[in-house]
Amino acid sequence: MSKKEETKKPLSHLLEYCKGYLPFLIIAAICAIGGTILTILGPDKLSEMTNVITDGIMTGIDMDAISKIAWTLVGFYALSLTLSVTQGQITARVTQRISQKLRGDLSQKINKLPMWYYNQTTTGDVLSRVTNDVDAISQALNQSVGNLVTSTCLFFGSFIMMLKTNVILTVTAVGATFIGFVVMGLVMKKSQGYFIKQQEYLGKINGHIEEVFSGHTIVRAYNAEAKMSDTFHGMNNELKTSAFKAQFLSGLMMPVMIFIGNLGYVAVCIVGAMLALNGHISFGVIVAFIMYIRYFTQPLGQIAQAVQSLQPAAAASKRVFEFLYAEEMEDESHKKVQLEDVKGEVEFKKVHFGYEGTQRTIINNFSAHVKPGQKIAIVGPTGAGKTTLINLLMRYNEINSGEILIDGTSIHDISKAALRDQFCMVLQDTWLFEGSIKENLVYNNDNISDEAIERACKAVGMDHFIKSLPEGYNTILNDKLSLSAGQKQQLTIARAMIKDAPMLILDEATSSVDTRTELVIQKAMDQLMEGRTSFVIAHRLSTIKNADVILVLKDGDILESGNHEALMEKGGFYADLYNSQFEKTA
Protein backbone atom coordinates (compact mmCIF):
# COMPACT_ATOMS: atom_id res chain seq x y z
CA MET A 1 0.00 0.00 0.00
CA SER A 2 1.36 3.41 -0.93
CA LYS A 3 1.83 6.24 1.56
CA LYS A 4 -0.93 8.16 -0.17
CA GLU A 5 -3.33 5.24 0.31
CA GLU A 6 -2.23 4.84 3.93
CA THR A 7 -3.10 8.49 4.55
CA LYS A 8 -6.50 8.17 2.90
CA LYS A 9 -7.51 4.94 4.57
CA PRO A 10 -7.75 6.18 8.20
CA LEU A 11 -9.67 9.28 7.11
CA SER A 12 -11.98 7.17 4.94
CA HIS A 13 -12.67 4.98 8.00
CA LEU A 14 -13.42 8.11 10.00
CA LEU A 15 -15.77 9.44 7.31
CA GLU A 16 -17.53 6.07 7.19
CA TYR A 17 -17.84 6.17 10.97
CA CYS A 18 -19.37 9.69 10.84
CA LYS A 19 -21.96 8.95 8.15
CA GLY A 20 -24.73 8.64 10.76
CA TYR A 21 -24.26 12.32 11.53
CA LEU A 22 -24.30 13.32 7.86
CA PRO A 23 -27.67 15.20 8.03
CA PHE A 24 -26.36 17.44 10.81
CA LEU A 25 -23.10 18.03 8.95
CA ILE A 26 -25.05 18.94 5.80
CA ILE A 27 -27.06 21.52 7.79
CA ALA A 28 -23.81 22.90 9.20
CA ALA A 29 -22.34 23.03 5.67
CA ILE A 30 -25.41 24.86 4.36
CA CYS A 31 -25.09 27.42 7.17
CA ALA A 32 -21.38 27.83 6.40
CA ILE A 33 -22.03 28.23 2.67
CA GLY A 34 -24.85 30.70 3.27
CA GLY A 35 -22.71 32.80 5.59
CA THR A 36 -19.84 32.72 3.14
CA ILE A 37 -22.00 33.81 0.19
CA LEU A 38 -23.28 36.77 2.19
CA THR A 39 -19.69 37.70 3.07
CA ILE A 40 -18.60 37.48 -0.57
CA LEU A 41 -21.41 39.77 -1.68
CA GLY A 42 -20.13 42.47 0.66
CA PRO A 43 -17.25 43.76 -1.54
CA ASP A 44 -19.61 44.07 -4.51
CA LYS A 45 -21.83 46.39 -2.43
CA LEU A 46 -18.77 48.29 -1.18
CA SER A 47 -17.64 48.73 -4.80
CA GLU A 48 -21.11 50.05 -5.64
CA MET A 49 -20.94 52.48 -2.69
CA THR A 50 -17.46 53.68 -3.76
CA ASN A 51 -18.69 54.33 -7.29
CA VAL A 52 -21.68 56.31 -5.94
CA ILE A 53 -19.34 58.44 -3.85
CA THR A 54 -16.74 59.01 -6.60
CA ASP A 55 -19.44 59.76 -9.20
CA GLY A 56 -21.13 62.20 -6.85
CA ILE A 57 -18.06 64.22 -5.88
CA MET A 58 -18.72 66.70 -8.69
CA THR A 59 -22.55 66.51 -8.89
CA GLY A 60 -23.52 65.67 -5.30
CA ILE A 61 -23.51 62.45 -3.34
CA ASP A 62 -26.74 60.43 -3.26
CA MET A 63 -27.08 59.80 0.49
CA ASP A 64 -30.25 57.73 0.06
CA ALA A 65 -28.42 55.27 -2.19
CA ILE A 66 -25.48 55.11 0.24
CA SER A 67 -27.85 54.56 3.20
CA LYS A 68 -29.64 51.79 1.32
CA ILE A 69 -26.35 50.05 0.46
CA ALA A 70 -25.09 50.46 4.06
CA TRP A 71 -28.21 48.87 5.57
CA THR A 72 -28.00 46.05 3.02
CA LEU A 73 -24.40 45.40 4.14
CA VAL A 74 -25.45 45.42 7.82
CA GLY A 75 -28.15 42.84 6.99
CA PHE A 76 -25.69 40.69 5.05
CA TYR A 77 -23.11 40.64 7.85
CA ALA A 78 -25.70 40.14 10.64
CA LEU A 79 -27.24 37.17 8.84
CA SER A 80 -23.76 35.83 8.06
CA LEU A 81 -22.90 36.01 11.78
CA THR A 82 -26.09 34.13 12.71
CA LEU A 83 -25.38 31.37 10.20
CA SER A 84 -21.75 31.09 11.36
CA VAL A 85 -22.79 30.76 15.03
CA THR A 86 -25.37 28.09 14.09
CA GLN A 87 -22.78 26.20 12.04
CA GLY A 88 -20.27 26.33 14.93
CA GLN A 89 -22.82 25.04 17.44
CA ILE A 90 -23.90 22.13 15.22
CA THR A 91 -20.29 21.19 14.46
CA ALA A 92 -19.34 21.24 18.16
CA ARG A 93 -22.31 19.04 19.10
CA VAL A 94 -21.64 16.54 16.32
CA THR A 95 -17.93 16.42 17.15
CA GLN A 96 -18.55 15.65 20.81
CA ARG A 97 -21.12 12.99 19.95
CA ILE A 98 -18.66 11.33 17.58
CA SER A 99 -15.97 11.45 20.30
CA GLN A 100 -18.42 10.00 22.82
CA LYS A 101 -19.34 7.18 20.42
CA LEU A 102 -15.67 6.49 19.66
CA ARG A 103 -14.79 6.19 23.34
CA GLY A 104 -17.84 4.01 23.95
CA ASP A 105 -16.94 1.70 21.06
CA LEU A 106 -13.32 1.52 22.22
CA SER A 107 -14.49 0.64 25.73
CA GLN A 108 -16.69 -2.16 24.37
CA LYS A 109 -13.89 -3.34 22.08
CA ILE A 110 -11.60 -3.80 25.09
CA ASN A 111 -13.92 -6.56 26.33
CA LYS A 112 -14.12 -8.24 22.92
CA LEU A 113 -10.41 -8.67 22.26
CA PRO A 114 -8.67 -11.98 23.03
CA MET A 115 -6.11 -12.19 25.83
CA TRP A 116 -3.22 -12.61 23.39
CA TYR A 117 -3.82 -9.09 22.09
CA TYR A 118 -3.03 -7.63 25.51
CA ASN A 119 0.06 -9.80 25.79
CA GLN A 120 1.39 -7.98 22.71
CA THR A 121 0.21 -4.43 23.58
CA THR A 122 1.04 -2.29 26.59
CA THR A 123 -1.75 -0.95 28.80
CA GLY A 124 -0.47 2.61 28.33
CA ASP A 125 -0.71 2.32 24.55
CA VAL A 126 -4.34 1.17 24.78
CA LEU A 127 -5.11 4.07 27.14
CA SER A 128 -3.44 6.49 24.74
CA ARG A 129 -5.75 5.34 21.93
CA VAL A 130 -8.83 5.87 24.10
CA THR A 131 -7.73 9.31 25.37
CA ASN A 132 -5.06 11.11 23.34
CA ASP A 133 -5.97 9.74 19.92
CA VAL A 134 -9.71 10.35 20.34
CA ASP A 135 -8.96 13.89 21.57
CA ALA A 136 -6.81 14.50 18.48
CA ILE A 137 -9.68 13.36 16.24
CA SER A 138 -12.18 15.49 18.18
CA GLN A 139 -10.08 18.64 17.93
CA ALA A 140 -9.43 18.14 14.23
CA LEU A 141 -13.12 17.59 13.47
CA ASN A 142 -14.17 20.59 15.53
CA GLN A 143 -11.56 22.94 14.09
CA SER A 144 -11.16 21.64 10.55
CA VAL A 145 -14.52 20.52 9.14
CA GLY A 146 -16.23 23.90 9.46
CA ASN A 147 -13.11 25.75 8.32
CA LEU A 148 -12.74 23.51 5.28
CA VAL A 149 -16.33 24.09 4.15
CA THR A 150 -16.22 27.85 4.81
CA SER A 151 -12.78 28.34 3.31
CA THR A 152 -13.48 26.27 0.19
CA CYS A 153 -16.72 28.14 -0.43
CA LEU A 154 -15.01 31.49 0.22
CA PHE A 155 -12.13 30.58 -2.10
CA PHE A 156 -14.26 29.57 -5.08
CA GLY A 157 -16.88 32.23 -4.41
CA SER A 158 -14.33 35.04 -4.36
CA PHE A 159 -12.71 33.60 -7.49
CA ILE A 160 -16.05 33.69 -9.35
CA MET A 161 -16.75 37.23 -8.17
CA MET A 162 -13.27 38.35 -9.25
CA LEU A 163 -13.80 36.89 -12.72
CA LYS A 164 -17.15 38.62 -12.87
CA THR A 165 -15.57 41.96 -11.86
CA ASN A 166 -12.37 41.99 -13.95
CA VAL A 167 -10.49 39.20 -15.73
CA ILE A 168 -7.08 40.97 -15.90
CA LEU A 169 -6.98 41.63 -12.12
CA THR A 170 -8.16 38.07 -11.50
CA VAL A 171 -5.25 36.64 -13.51
CA THR A 172 -2.89 38.93 -11.56
CA ALA A 173 -4.27 37.77 -8.19
CA VAL A 174 -4.24 34.09 -9.13
CA GLY A 175 -0.70 34.31 -10.48
CA ALA A 176 0.53 35.89 -7.25
CA THR A 177 -1.11 33.18 -5.09
CA PHE A 178 -0.31 30.13 -7.23
CA ILE A 179 2.83 29.55 -5.22
CA GLY A 180 0.58 28.98 -2.19
CA PHE A 181 -0.73 25.74 -3.63
CA VAL A 182 2.80 24.47 -4.24
CA VAL A 183 3.91 25.30 -0.69
CA MET A 184 0.78 23.71 0.79
CA GLY A 185 1.33 20.45 -1.09
CA LEU A 186 4.99 20.20 -0.11
CA VAL A 187 4.34 20.89 3.58
CA MET A 188 1.45 18.43 3.78
CA LYS A 189 3.50 15.66 2.19
CA LYS A 190 6.44 16.23 4.50
CA SER A 191 4.55 16.68 7.76
CA GLN A 192 2.31 13.59 7.60
CA GLY A 193 5.11 11.21 8.60
CA TYR A 194 6.02 13.36 11.58
CA PHE A 195 2.44 13.49 12.83
CA ILE A 196 2.23 9.68 12.69
CA LYS A 197 5.48 9.40 14.66
CA GLN A 198 4.19 11.94 17.17
CA GLN A 199 1.10 9.83 17.98
CA GLU A 200 3.11 6.59 18.09
CA TYR A 201 5.69 7.95 20.54
CA LEU A 202 2.92 9.48 22.64
CA GLY A 203 1.47 5.97 23.01
CA LYS A 204 4.92 4.53 23.82
CA ILE A 205 5.53 7.15 26.50
CA ASN A 206 2.14 6.43 28.09
CA GLY A 207 2.96 2.72 28.11
CA HIS A 208 6.37 3.35 29.66
CA ILE A 209 5.01 5.66 32.38
CA GLU A 210 2.22 3.19 33.24
CA GLU A 211 4.75 0.35 33.45
CA VAL A 212 7.23 2.27 35.63
CA PHE A 213 4.52 3.69 37.90
CA SER A 214 2.90 0.29 38.53
CA GLY A 215 6.33 -1.24 39.22
CA HIS A 216 7.92 1.71 41.01
CA THR A 217 8.76 -0.42 44.09
CA ILE A 218 10.87 -2.81 41.99
CA VAL A 219 12.45 0.07 40.10
CA ARG A 220 13.60 1.65 43.36
CA ALA A 221 14.63 -1.67 44.89
CA TYR A 222 17.03 -2.25 41.99
CA ASN A 223 18.15 1.40 41.83
CA ALA A 224 16.98 1.48 38.23
CA GLU A 225 15.63 5.05 38.37
CA ALA A 226 18.46 6.34 36.19
CA LYS A 227 17.99 3.59 33.60
CA MET A 228 14.21 4.11 33.45
CA SER A 229 14.80 7.86 33.25
CA ASP A 230 17.21 7.39 30.34
CA THR A 231 14.65 5.22 28.52
CA PHE A 232 11.97 7.83 29.11
CA HIS A 233 14.20 10.70 27.97
CA GLY A 234 15.08 8.75 24.82
CA MET A 235 11.41 8.34 23.89
CA ASN A 236 10.66 11.88 25.04
CA ASN A 237 13.38 13.23 22.74
CA GLU A 238 11.95 11.26 19.82
CA LEU A 239 8.50 12.67 20.62
CA LYS A 240 9.93 16.18 20.90
CA THR A 241 11.75 15.87 17.58
CA SER A 242 8.78 14.51 15.65
CA ALA A 243 6.34 16.92 17.34
CA PHE A 244 8.66 19.88 16.69
CA LYS A 245 9.03 19.03 13.00
CA ALA A 246 5.29 18.44 12.62
CA GLN A 247 4.34 21.66 14.41
CA PHE A 248 7.10 23.69 12.74
CA LEU A 249 5.96 22.64 9.28
CA SER A 250 2.36 23.27 10.30
CA GLY A 251 3.31 26.70 11.63
CA LEU A 252 4.97 27.64 8.35
CA MET A 253 1.65 27.72 6.57
CA MET A 254 0.19 30.94 7.93
CA PRO A 255 3.34 33.14 7.56
CA VAL A 256 3.80 31.91 3.98
CA MET A 257 0.16 32.50 3.15
CA ILE A 258 0.25 35.99 4.72
CA PHE A 259 3.28 36.83 2.59
CA ILE A 260 1.50 35.56 -0.52
CA GLY A 261 -1.60 37.56 0.41
CA ASN A 262 0.46 40.73 0.80
CA LEU A 263 2.14 40.00 -2.53
CA GLY A 264 -1.33 39.71 -4.07
CA TYR A 265 -2.30 43.11 -2.60
CA VAL A 266 0.75 44.74 -4.15
CA ALA A 267 0.17 43.13 -7.56
CA VAL A 268 -3.52 44.12 -7.61
CA CYS A 269 -2.75 47.70 -6.54
CA ILE A 270 -0.08 48.17 -9.24
CA VAL A 271 -2.05 46.57 -12.08
CA GLY A 272 -5.32 48.12 -10.88
CA ALA A 273 -3.79 51.61 -10.72
CA MET A 274 -2.49 51.24 -14.28
CA LEU A 275 -5.93 50.12 -15.53
CA ALA A 276 -7.70 52.92 -13.62
CA LEU A 277 -5.38 55.58 -15.03
CA ASN A 278 -6.07 54.28 -18.52
CA GLY A 279 -9.81 54.43 -17.79
CA HIS A 280 -10.40 50.69 -18.13
CA ILE A 281 -11.80 50.27 -14.57
CA SER A 282 -13.23 52.46 -11.84
CA PHE A 283 -11.72 52.97 -8.37
CA GLY A 284 -14.63 50.96 -6.96
CA VAL A 285 -13.28 47.87 -8.75
CA ILE A 286 -9.90 48.32 -7.04
CA VAL A 287 -11.63 48.63 -3.63
CA ALA A 288 -13.61 45.45 -4.31
CA PHE A 289 -10.50 43.59 -5.50
CA ILE A 290 -8.51 44.56 -2.40
CA MET A 291 -11.18 42.75 -0.36
CA TYR A 292 -11.50 39.90 -2.85
CA ILE A 293 -7.75 39.27 -2.75
CA ARG A 294 -8.05 38.86 1.05
CA TYR A 295 -11.01 36.50 0.63
CA PHE A 296 -9.05 34.60 -2.01
CA THR A 297 -5.74 34.21 -0.15
CA GLN A 298 -7.12 33.87 3.38
CA PRO A 299 -8.93 30.59 2.58
CA LEU A 300 -5.69 29.15 1.24
CA GLY A 301 -4.13 29.59 4.67
CA GLN A 302 -7.25 28.31 6.40
CA ILE A 303 -7.50 25.31 4.09
CA ALA A 304 -3.82 24.58 4.65
CA GLN A 305 -4.31 24.92 8.40
CA ALA A 306 -7.41 22.72 8.34
CA VAL A 307 -5.73 20.06 6.23
CA GLN A 308 -2.69 20.30 8.49
CA SER A 309 -4.96 19.73 11.50
CA LEU A 310 -6.26 16.62 9.76
CA GLN A 311 -2.74 15.17 9.67
CA PRO A 312 -2.66 14.30 13.41
CA ALA A 313 -6.29 13.22 13.06
CA ALA A 314 -5.28 10.83 10.27
CA ALA A 315 -2.45 9.46 12.42
CA ALA A 316 -4.78 9.14 15.43
CA SER A 317 -7.51 7.56 13.28
CA LYS A 318 -5.05 4.97 12.03
CA ARG A 319 -4.32 3.90 15.62
CA VAL A 320 -7.95 4.08 16.77
CA PHE A 321 -9.35 2.07 13.85
CA GLU A 322 -6.49 -0.43 14.05
CA PHE A 323 -7.81 -1.12 17.55
CA LEU A 324 -11.50 -1.08 16.54
CA TYR A 325 -10.86 -3.45 13.61
CA ALA A 326 -8.57 -5.80 15.54
CA GLU A 327 -9.55 -9.46 15.51
CA GLU A 328 -12.23 -10.11 18.10
CA MET A 329 -13.12 -13.18 20.08
CA GLU A 330 -15.66 -15.51 18.52
CA ASP A 331 -19.25 -14.25 18.61
CA GLU A 332 -21.06 -16.51 21.05
CA SER A 333 -24.56 -15.08 20.88
CA HIS A 334 -25.70 -18.31 19.17
CA LYS A 335 -24.52 -20.50 22.06
CA LYS A 336 -27.60 -21.24 24.14
CA VAL A 337 -26.25 -24.20 26.13
CA GLN A 338 -26.47 -23.54 29.87
CA LEU A 339 -24.81 -25.47 32.69
CA GLU A 340 -27.38 -26.22 35.38
CA ASP A 341 -26.90 -28.04 38.68
CA VAL A 342 -23.18 -28.33 37.96
CA LYS A 343 -21.57 -31.30 39.68
CA GLY A 344 -18.04 -30.30 38.76
CA GLU A 345 -16.80 -33.21 36.66
CA VAL A 346 -13.97 -31.89 34.48
CA GLU A 347 -12.13 -33.78 31.76
CA PHE A 348 -9.15 -32.76 29.63
CA LYS A 349 -8.82 -34.80 26.41
CA LYS A 350 -5.54 -34.64 24.47
CA VAL A 351 -5.25 -30.86 24.87
CA HIS A 352 -2.58 -29.01 22.87
CA PHE A 353 -1.88 -25.30 23.19
CA GLY A 354 0.67 -22.73 22.03
CA TYR A 355 0.47 -18.94 22.31
CA GLU A 356 -0.64 -16.88 19.32
CA GLY A 357 2.22 -15.95 17.00
CA THR A 358 4.66 -18.55 18.37
CA GLN A 359 5.63 -22.03 17.22
CA ARG A 360 6.31 -23.30 20.75
CA THR A 361 3.74 -25.68 22.25
CA ILE A 362 3.09 -25.02 25.96
CA ILE A 363 0.64 -27.84 26.65
CA ASN A 364 1.39 -31.17 24.95
CA ASN A 365 -1.28 -33.87 24.62
CA PHE A 366 -2.61 -33.19 28.13
CA SER A 367 -5.33 -35.53 29.43
CA ALA A 368 -6.84 -35.71 32.91
CA HIS A 369 -10.15 -36.63 34.53
CA VAL A 370 -11.40 -34.79 37.61
CA LYS A 371 -14.31 -36.21 39.58
CA PRO A 372 -16.97 -33.96 41.13
CA GLY A 373 -15.94 -32.43 44.44
CA GLN A 374 -12.28 -33.38 44.14
CA LYS A 375 -9.47 -31.06 45.18
CA ILE A 376 -6.93 -31.06 42.36
CA ALA A 377 -3.50 -29.61 43.06
CA ILE A 378 -1.36 -28.61 40.10
CA VAL A 379 2.35 -28.38 40.85
CA GLY A 380 5.55 -28.19 38.87
CA PRO A 381 8.51 -25.98 38.14
CA THR A 382 8.15 -22.47 36.72
CA GLY A 383 7.06 -22.57 33.09
CA ALA A 384 5.52 -26.04 33.37
CA GLY A 385 2.14 -24.74 32.17
CA LYS A 386 0.19 -24.62 35.45
CA THR A 387 -1.44 -21.20 35.03
CA THR A 388 -1.81 -21.79 31.28
CA LEU A 389 -3.88 -24.87 32.05
CA ILE A 390 -6.26 -22.82 34.21
CA ASN A 391 -6.47 -20.13 31.52
CA LEU A 392 -7.56 -22.80 29.04
CA LEU A 393 -10.19 -24.07 31.46
CA MET A 394 -11.57 -20.52 31.86
CA ARG A 395 -11.20 -19.90 28.10
CA TYR A 396 -8.94 -16.91 28.57
CA ASN A 397 -6.99 -18.69 25.86
CA GLU A 398 -8.36 -21.12 23.28
CA ILE A 399 -6.87 -24.59 22.84
CA ASN A 400 -5.30 -25.49 19.51
CA SER A 401 -6.68 -29.04 19.55
CA GLY A 402 -8.31 -31.47 21.93
CA GLU A 403 -11.30 -30.92 24.17
CA ILE A 404 -12.21 -29.80 27.69
CA LEU A 405 -15.51 -31.05 29.16
CA ILE A 406 -17.53 -29.98 32.20
CA ASP A 407 -20.19 -32.49 33.22
CA GLY A 408 -19.79 -34.03 29.78
CA THR A 409 -20.38 -30.74 27.92
CA SER A 410 -17.60 -29.22 25.84
CA ILE A 411 -16.70 -25.75 27.09
CA HIS A 412 -16.69 -24.57 23.45
CA ASP A 413 -20.43 -25.22 23.31
CA ILE A 414 -20.92 -22.83 26.26
CA SER A 415 -20.53 -19.07 26.12
CA LYS A 416 -17.60 -17.64 28.06
CA ALA A 417 -19.94 -15.73 30.36
CA ALA A 418 -21.94 -18.87 31.21
CA LEU A 419 -18.73 -20.85 31.73
CA ARG A 420 -17.10 -18.31 34.03
CA ASP A 421 -20.24 -18.06 36.15
CA GLN A 422 -19.41 -21.58 37.35
CA PHE A 423 -16.05 -20.55 38.83
CA CYS A 424 -14.86 -18.38 41.64
CA MET A 425 -11.21 -17.46 41.35
CA VAL A 426 -8.40 -16.12 43.54
CA LEU A 427 -5.20 -15.15 41.78
CA GLN A 428 -1.72 -14.42 43.05
CA ASP A 429 -2.03 -10.88 41.70
CA THR A 430 -4.77 -9.17 43.67
CA TRP A 431 -7.12 -6.68 42.00
CA LEU A 432 -9.23 -4.15 43.88
CA PHE A 433 -10.93 -1.15 42.33
CA GLU A 434 -11.54 2.29 43.87
CA GLY A 435 -14.78 1.91 45.76
CA SER A 436 -16.01 0.74 49.15
CA ILE A 437 -14.82 -2.52 50.69
CA LYS A 438 -18.38 -3.83 50.41
CA GLU A 439 -18.56 -2.98 46.70
CA ASN A 440 -15.28 -4.83 46.13
CA LEU A 441 -16.50 -7.90 48.00
CA VAL A 442 -19.83 -8.21 46.16
CA TYR A 443 -18.29 -7.31 42.79
CA ASN A 444 -20.89 -7.91 40.05
CA ASN A 445 -23.08 -10.02 42.37
CA ASP A 446 -26.57 -8.91 43.34
CA ASN A 447 -28.67 -9.60 46.42
CA ILE A 448 -25.76 -10.39 48.73
CA SER A 449 -26.74 -9.91 52.39
CA ASP A 450 -24.56 -8.11 54.92
CA GLU A 451 -24.51 -11.30 56.99
CA ALA A 452 -22.99 -13.26 54.07
CA ILE A 453 -20.33 -10.57 53.60
CA GLU A 454 -19.39 -10.54 57.28
CA ARG A 455 -19.36 -14.35 57.42
CA ALA A 456 -16.86 -14.51 54.53
CA CYS A 457 -14.64 -11.84 56.07
CA LYS A 458 -14.67 -13.60 59.44
CA ALA A 459 -13.63 -16.80 57.70
CA VAL A 460 -10.53 -15.12 56.23
CA GLY A 461 -9.76 -13.13 59.39
CA MET A 462 -10.60 -9.64 58.03
CA ASP A 463 -13.85 -8.80 59.82
CA HIS A 464 -12.24 -7.28 62.92
CA PHE A 465 -9.84 -5.14 60.86
CA ILE A 466 -12.63 -3.85 58.59
CA LYS A 467 -14.88 -2.94 61.54
CA SER A 468 -12.00 -1.00 63.10
CA LEU A 469 -11.96 1.34 60.09
CA PRO A 470 -13.88 4.67 60.42
CA GLU A 471 -16.57 3.69 57.90
CA GLY A 472 -16.38 -0.07 58.37
CA TYR A 473 -17.46 -1.97 55.26
CA ASN A 474 -18.29 1.33 53.57
CA THR A 475 -14.68 2.54 53.79
CA ILE A 476 -13.43 3.60 50.36
CA LEU A 477 -10.38 1.78 49.05
CA ASN A 478 -8.04 4.38 47.57
CA ASP A 479 -4.53 5.79 48.03
CA LYS A 480 -5.47 7.15 51.46
CA LEU A 481 -6.20 3.66 52.82
CA SER A 482 -3.02 1.59 52.72
CA LEU A 483 -3.60 -2.16 52.71
CA SER A 484 -0.83 -4.70 52.80
CA ALA A 485 -0.47 -7.26 50.01
CA GLY A 486 -1.74 -9.93 52.40
CA GLN A 487 -4.83 -7.92 53.36
CA LYS A 488 -5.66 -7.34 49.70
CA GLN A 489 -5.35 -11.06 49.09
CA GLN A 490 -7.62 -11.83 52.04
CA LEU A 491 -10.27 -9.54 50.53
CA THR A 492 -10.05 -11.28 47.14
CA ILE A 493 -10.41 -14.65 48.86
CA ALA A 494 -13.49 -13.36 50.70
CA ARG A 495 -14.85 -12.13 47.35
CA ALA A 496 -14.50 -15.65 45.93
CA MET A 497 -16.27 -17.12 48.96
CA ILE A 498 -19.16 -14.67 48.55
CA LYS A 499 -19.64 -15.61 44.89
CA ASP A 500 -20.19 -19.20 46.02
CA ALA A 501 -19.74 -20.77 42.55
CA PRO A 502 -19.75 -24.57 42.13
CA MET A 503 -16.08 -24.71 41.13
CA LEU A 504 -13.04 -22.97 42.56
CA ILE A 505 -9.65 -21.91 41.20
CA LEU A 506 -6.83 -20.86 43.51
CA ASP A 507 -3.64 -19.68 41.87
CA GLU A 508 -1.06 -19.33 44.65
CA ALA A 509 -3.83 -17.68 46.72
CA THR A 510 -1.91 -17.50 50.01
CA SER A 511 1.47 -16.43 48.64
CA SER A 512 1.33 -12.94 50.21
CA VAL A 513 0.14 -13.81 53.74
CA ASP A 514 2.07 -14.80 56.84
CA THR A 515 2.04 -18.33 58.25
CA ARG A 516 -0.54 -17.60 60.97
CA THR A 517 -2.93 -15.89 58.55
CA GLU A 518 -2.34 -18.71 56.09
CA LEU A 519 -3.62 -21.22 58.63
CA VAL A 520 -6.80 -19.16 59.16
CA ILE A 521 -7.33 -18.85 55.41
CA GLN A 522 -6.51 -22.50 54.81
CA LYS A 523 -9.21 -23.51 57.28
CA ALA A 524 -11.68 -21.22 55.48
CA MET A 525 -10.57 -22.64 52.15
CA ASP A 526 -11.13 -26.18 53.34
CA GLN A 527 -14.70 -25.21 54.24
CA LEU A 528 -15.16 -23.46 50.91
CA MET A 529 -13.83 -26.44 48.94
CA GLU A 530 -16.17 -28.95 50.57
CA GLY A 531 -18.43 -30.36 47.83
CA ARG A 532 -16.75 -28.22 45.16
CA THR A 533 -14.35 -29.21 42.43
CA SER A 534 -11.25 -27.17 43.22
CA PHE A 535 -8.11 -26.49 41.22
CA VAL A 536 -5.21 -25.30 43.33
CA ILE A 537 -1.91 -24.04 41.97
CA ALA A 538 0.70 -23.88 44.69
CA HIS A 539 4.44 -23.58 44.98
CA ARG A 540 4.38 -24.24 48.72
CA LEU A 541 3.67 -27.95 48.60
CA SER A 542 2.77 -28.10 52.30
CA THR A 543 -0.55 -26.36 51.46
CA ILE A 544 -1.75 -29.11 49.11
CA LYS A 545 -0.87 -32.27 51.08
CA ASN A 546 -4.58 -32.99 51.58
CA ALA A 547 -5.42 -32.76 47.85
CA ASP A 548 -7.33 -35.71 46.39
CA VAL A 549 -5.17 -35.70 43.26
CA ILE A 550 -1.87 -33.95 42.63
CA LEU A 551 -0.95 -33.38 38.99
CA VAL A 552 2.78 -32.91 38.54
CA LEU A 553 3.43 -30.95 35.33
CA LYS A 554 6.67 -30.54 33.49
CA ASP A 555 7.00 -28.99 30.02
CA GLY A 556 3.22 -29.13 29.49
CA ASP A 557 2.87 -32.86 30.22
CA ILE A 558 1.67 -34.80 33.27
CA LEU A 559 4.83 -36.33 34.67
CA GLU A 560 3.17 -37.89 37.72
CA SER A 561 -0.28 -38.00 39.34
CA GLY A 562 -1.72 -39.30 42.60
CA ASN A 563 -2.18 -38.18 46.19
CA HIS A 564 0.62 -36.90 48.40
CA GLU A 565 1.40 -40.22 50.12
CA ALA A 566 1.47 -42.20 46.87
CA LEU A 567 3.75 -39.71 45.16
CA MET A 568 6.13 -39.58 48.12
CA GLU A 569 6.34 -43.37 48.19
CA LYS A 570 7.10 -43.36 44.49
CA GLY A 571 10.17 -41.20 45.17
CA GLY A 572 10.00 -39.47 41.80
CA PHE A 573 10.00 -35.85 40.63
CA TYR A 574 7.31 -34.73 43.14
CA ALA A 575 9.18 -36.30 46.08
CA ASP A 576 12.36 -34.49 45.04
CA LEU A 577 10.41 -31.24 44.66
CA TYR A 578 8.77 -31.65 48.09
CA ASN A 579 11.95 -32.66 49.89
CA SER A 580 13.89 -29.78 48.37
CA GLN A 581 11.52 -27.35 50.16
CA PHE A 582 12.04 -28.97 53.54
CA GLU A 583 15.57 -30.27 53.46
CA LYS A 584 17.49 -29.29 56.56
CA THR A 585 20.78 -27.54 56.53
CA ALA A 586 23.63 -29.53 57.87
Image (cartoon, helix red, strand yellow):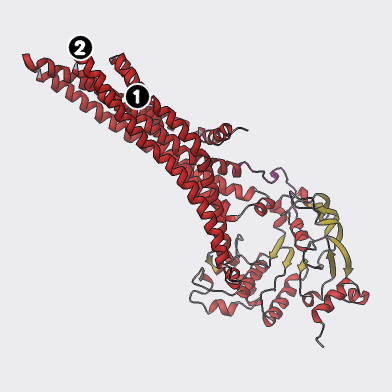
Residue positioned most to the left: 59
Residue positioned most to the right: 570
Viewer-closest of 322 and 490: 322
Residue at the spot of label 1: 176
Viewer-closest of 497 and 296: 296
- Report the residue at 75% width, 48% height from top: 337
Q: Would residue 103 be seen by someone viewing this image from the given angle?
A: no
| Element type where label 2 sits in the image | loop
Query: Considering only vertical position in the picture, is 331 above or below 374?
Result: above
Q: Main SS type for the magenta part?
A: loop
Viewer-closest of 251 and 376: 251
Residue 44 point in image, percent of width and height: 24, 20
Residue 576 point in image, percent of width and height: 86, 75
- Report the residue at 36% width, 32% height from top: 257
- Report the residue at 32% width, 19% height from top: 172
Q: Would residue 267 be seen by someone viewing this image from the given angle?
A: yes
Q: For the C terminus, which image quadrant?
A: bottom right
Residue 345 point in image, percent of width and height: 82, 60
Q: Of the residues shown, which amino acid type is indicated by label 1?
A: Ala
Residue at the spot of label 2: 278
Q: Of the residues shown, which amino acid type is indicated by label 2?
A: Asn
Residue 339 in the magenta stretch? The answer is yes
Question: How many dots with numbers?
Answer: 2
- Report the residue at 52% width, 58% height from top: 233
| Element type where label 1 sits in the image | helix
Picture quadrant of residue 179: top left
Mark 2 or mark 1: whose residue is earlier in sequence? 1
Q: Residue 473 has which mark?
A: none
Left or right? Give the position of 78 relative to 202: left
Magenta stretch, residue numbers: 324-345
